[in-house]
């Protein structure tokens, strides 16, 4: 059952035909209704980020590992500045 849920919940790490990363360092002008502390897992084609109980920087590092490789360096630099 858990494997099936993970397969159904997998999201592409990119949007716009690969032009944009779905993993971003900051949400601009967005209304967030779910606190980040309630998000347990994020799944892309590059793996699973287990975010449960982790501090902010550890969560960012876990998300970077499952971002599309073409965006990882830029995301890492932008996360360091934010």
Image (cartoon, rainbow, N blue to C red):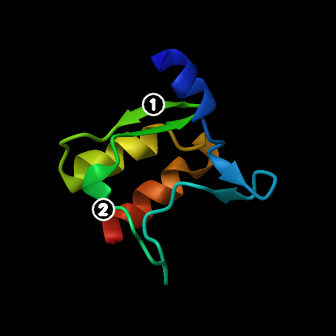
Nearest to N terminus: mark 2 or mark 1: 2
Q: Disc 1 on helix, strand or loop?
A: strand
Picture coordinates of residue 61, whole percent (x, y): 34, 45
Position of 50 relative to 16 (above/below): above
Mark whose residue sits in front, 2 or 1: 2
- Check residue 48 in the rendering and tell me which mark sits there, or answer none: 1
Q: Pointer 2: residues within 10 angstroms few (<14), some, or many (20+)?
A: few
- In percent of the image, x 43 and y 70: which residue is there? 26
- Check residue 35 in the rendering and tell me which mark sits there, or answer none: 2
Position of 35 relative to 43 (above/below): below
- Check residue 9 in the rendering and tell me which mark sits there, or answer none: none
Position of 9 relative to 32 (above/below): above
Picture coordinates of residue 69, whole percent (x, y): 59, 41
Which quadrant, please, contains the C terminus? bottom left
Q: Total marks drawn?
A: 2
Give the side of residue 71 with respect to residue 64, left or right: right
- In percent of the image, x 32 and y 63: which residue is there? 80
Give the side of residue 69 with respect to residue 30, left or right: right
- In percent of the image, x 57 and y 35: which residue is there? 9
How far apart are labels 2 and 1 at the CA level? Answer: 19 Å
Camera-side residue of 14 and 70: 14
Q: Pointer 1: residues within 10 angstroms few (<14), some, or many (20+)?
A: some
Q: Quadrant of residue 56?
A: bottom left
């Amino acid at each position: 059952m858990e494997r099936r849920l993970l397969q159904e919940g997998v999201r592409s790490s990119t949007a716009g035909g690969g032009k944009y990363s779905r993993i971003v360092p900051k949400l601009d002008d967005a209304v967030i209704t779910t606190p980040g502390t309630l998000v347990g897992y994020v799944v892309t084609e590059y793996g699973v980020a287990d975010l449960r109980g982790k501090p902010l920087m550890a969560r960012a590092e876990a998300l970077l590992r499952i971002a599309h490789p073409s965006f990882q360096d830029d995301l890492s630099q932008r996360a360091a500045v934010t």
